[in-house]
Amino acid sequence: MNQSAQVELIHVSKQFLRQTGEQVAGLNNLTLSIHPGEVIGIIGTNGAGKSTLFNCLTGQIPIDSGDILIDGQSIYSMSAQSLARQIGRVFQDPRMGSAPRMSVFENLMLANKRGEKRGLGRSLTTNNRKYLIEKLKPFRLDLEHRLDVPIENLSGGQRQAVSLVMATLLQPKLLLLDEHTASLDPRTAKEVMKMTQHLIQENNLTTIMITHHLQDAIEFCDRIVVMHQGRIVNIYTSEQIETLSTTDLYQYLVDLVEREVLENYTV
């Protein structure tokens, strides 16, 4: 069983430079403690800094100030290989995060060796095949019969299911879900979300989920963090979520945008 991680964002800031030379805050002094095994939902308007946050968490974008800790260790003191094994990520686009011309089996075995010297051929064993069939069956997307099919030939839902298994095979300390059901039809999105919850609970994963599906945030998350203009502007606790509706959340986001527009006017 994975030992779920404590994740700390400590005064994290990141600025970007526009072509005009103007500096824009991607992240502005973010501080957040995420408890072991907790599922955090991230919502916010466009440009709120959600994707920047994920890119900083994975080390893809360096921060300007502050620190990010996993179980007390700064991610900036870790090797790229170590960080890759500790963080799993599923993207919004089903085509990202996998090798399209390689088979489902090959992609899953590559994920299983993340951060190691490849040696893929030695992993393509009958035992590993049987193990992955059992991992794929619960999705009810016929993936257990498609291990030898190139990833590019799967449907969007099938690809996301494979991406979820790839991201969780190593039982990472932190799982990042980047609007991973946004491009799926409602029925498939519901099925993938149900299996996401199963994998999180089965592996006891500390998880951060960016979503535009407000009902998913309410239904699956322990806390909901609202971001706006690179800041955390509100955090809904588990107790508050119990009485929260999607209408409440939507109205809060609308009010944020209206306040932003009003702030740009002077009397």
Image (spheres, rainbow, N blue to C red):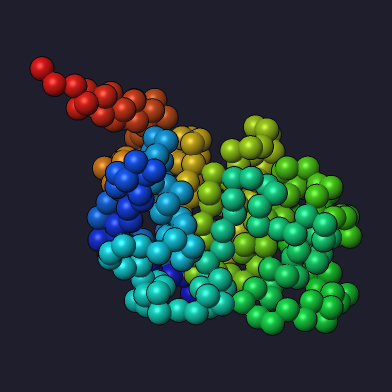
Residue 257 x %, y %: 31, 28
Horizontal arrangement in the rendering, residue 101 relative to residue 208 (left or right):
right
Q: Of residues 110 and 267, which is closer to you in this image?
A: 267
Please tell me whether residue 50 is drawn above or below residue 170 in the rendered image: above
Residue that extends furthest to the front in the rendered view of this protein:
20
Residue at image position (31%, 41%) is: 229
Residue 7 x %, y %: 38, 66
> Could you tell me if residue 92 is visible in this image?
yes
Quarter of the picture holding the C terminus:
top left
Q: Of residues 200 and 62, which is closer to you in this image?
A: 62
Which picture quadrant has residue 71? bottom left
Residue 63 x %, y %: 35, 62
Residue that extends furthest to the left in the rendered view of this protein:
267
Residue at image position (34%, 30%) is: 253
Residue that extends furthest to the top in the rendered view of this protein:
267
Which picture quadrant has residue 186? top right
Q: Of residues 140 and 260, which is closer to you in this image?
A: 260
Residue at image position (45%, 79%) is: 78
Horizontal arrangement in the rendering, residue 264 relative to residue 57 (left or right):
left
Please tell me whether residue 185 is drawn above or below residue 72 in the rendered image: above
Quarter of the picture holding the N terminus:
bottom right
